[in-house]
């Protein structure tokens, strides 16, 4: 779930685009809105498997690692740019380690589906590298369904081209995505977690020998003065963004990137600490969220210690004047403490003369058996560079810089 945050001290004013302009920029025409929906059609085009480019010159040798720039939207969403098909159709996507499938809105979505209208849409009729699949795709998100069908095409990110990648064209985008800057998702969880048995795009990167190692890593910066959020490194880890050596833990379930966390500890004062996740617990790293979620009872107790009070949408607020007095919170992972200071886990919002400070700790919204899971989002990753090693089935953490 995405929660909007604003970090500027003033509110910039912009001239709003007309409805026609806004729809045209994401590929929706007024004529599309006025026409009745047509049934889904199937098309098939020639797939480009040649070793030469459109001018007959040899294609360059693939890189063995690459870096994808990440951007942030209102400090609540992190996304990168990809393109699909030939000629390229560009999209902003969330790189999600808690999701295996990839999807973007389809040009065949209904004109009544407002979130779809306001995002970029994939039109397979315009892609020469499109391959028909047509399998129905439905995911129950609990509060809504993500509905569409599967298609296959080339996906480009940074300098890499993944050929023959299957993804979902979504014809019914849930209302929640109305507030999302990203158009869709590139799933980076394990293949066993994939709907319809679709091979996740990172598996195809490895299979097509596009990267040196089956590893990807995330660096998230905490600089609120820029929209640059960091980067996703494909093919290894980027040593210029972390200090020291990695602390590795094995993946315990190949669905989410799940591992065993030994404990969570709040240092209330020099002589007093309060433990959570006693005797160890399951945890995941979730790159799609800014918060840290955990079991509802433990999160409520933790926020009580922080003198945080419930606000809305599962969030808790604290008195901004007390931030410097709030305790450090440590996560024991792989025999090492990974500690967050209050400035790391309190999200400060300043909007004009209004100031709001939110705890990053929220109750998990996952269904059983994952309702007791801890999920470490950007509030944690922003302090600790995180490596995902598919080859050795392990996760590594190191201090970011």
Image (spheres, rainbow, N blue to C red):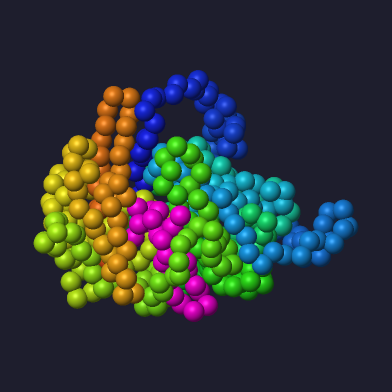
Q: Quadrant of residue 208?
A: bottom right
User: Residue 154, percent across and down?
Assistant: 66, 59
**37, 312: nearer the viewer:** 312
The stretch drawn in magenta includes residue 394: yes
Q: Quadrant of residue 121?
A: top right
**Residue positioned 30% across, 67% down in the render:** 337
User: Residue 75, percent across and down?
Assistant: 40, 42
**Which range is magenta?**
376-401
Residue 389 visible in this rendered orientation of the protein: yes
**61, 175: nearer the viewer:** 61
Residue 125 visible in this rendered orientation of the protein: no
**Residue positioned 18% across, 59% down in the render:** 267
User: Residue 226, percent across and down?
Assistant: 48, 39
Q: As drawn, which residue projects farthest toward the left?
A: 271
Look at the picture and state if 250 lies above or below 99. below
Look at the picture and state if 161 lies above or below 23. below
Name the side, left or right, on which 234 lies relative to 251: right
Name the side, left or right, on which 17 lies relative to 260: right
**122, 80: nearer the viewer:** 80
Look at the picture and state if 114 lies above or below 126. above
The stretch drawn in magenta includes residue 180: no
**Residue positioned 23% across, 69% down in the render:** 263
């Amino acid at each position: 779930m995405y929660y909007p945050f604003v970090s500027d001290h003033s509110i910039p004013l912009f001239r709003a685009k007309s409805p026609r302009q806004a729809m045209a920029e994401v590929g929706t025409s007024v004529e599309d809105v006025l026409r009745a929906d047509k049934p889904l059609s199937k098309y098939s085009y020639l797939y480009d498997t040649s070793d030469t480019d459109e001018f007959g010159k040899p294609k360059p040798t693939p890189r063995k690692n690459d870096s994808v720039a990440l951007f942030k939207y209102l400090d609540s969403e992190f996304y990168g740019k990809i393109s699909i098909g030939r000629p390229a159709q560009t999209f902003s996507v969330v790189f999600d380690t808690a999701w295996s499938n990839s999807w973007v809105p389809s040009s065949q979505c209904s004109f009544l589906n407002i979130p779809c209208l306001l995002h970029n849409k994939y039109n397979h009729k315009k892609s020469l590298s499109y391959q028909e699949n047509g399998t129905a795709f439905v995911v129950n998100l609990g509060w809504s369904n993500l509905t569409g069908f599967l298609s296959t095409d080339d996906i480009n990110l940074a300098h890499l081209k993944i050929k023959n990648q299957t993804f979902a064209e979504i014809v019914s985008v849930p209302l929640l995505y109305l507030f999302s800057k990203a158009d869709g998702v590139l799933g980076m969880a394990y293949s066993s977690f994939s709907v319809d048995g679709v091979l996740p795009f990172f598996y195809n990167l490895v299979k097509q020998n596009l990267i040196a190692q089956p590893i990807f890593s995330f660096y998230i910066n905490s600089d609120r003065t820029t929209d640059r959020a960091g980067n996703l490194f494909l093919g290894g880890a980027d040593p210029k963004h972390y200090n020291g050596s990695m602390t590795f833990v094995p993946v315990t379930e190949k669905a989410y990137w799940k591992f065993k966390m030994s404990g969570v500890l709040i240092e209330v004062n020099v002589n007093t600490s309060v433990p959570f996740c006693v005797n160890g617990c399951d945890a995941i790293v979730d790159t799609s969220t800014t918060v840290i979620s955990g079991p509802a009872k433990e999160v409520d107790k933790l926020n009580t210690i922080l003198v945080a009070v419930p606000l809305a949408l599962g969030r808790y607020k604290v008195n901004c004047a007390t931030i410097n007095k709030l305790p450090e919170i440590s996560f024991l992972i792989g025999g090492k403490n990974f500690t967050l200071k209050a400035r790391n886990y309190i999200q400060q919002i300043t909007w004009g003369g209004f100031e709001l400070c939110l705890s990053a700790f929220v109750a998990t919204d996952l269904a059983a058996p994952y309702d007791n899971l801890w999920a470490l989002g950007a509030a944690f990753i922003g302090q600790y560079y995180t490596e995902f090693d598919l080859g050795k089935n392990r996760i590594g953490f190191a201090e970011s810089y």
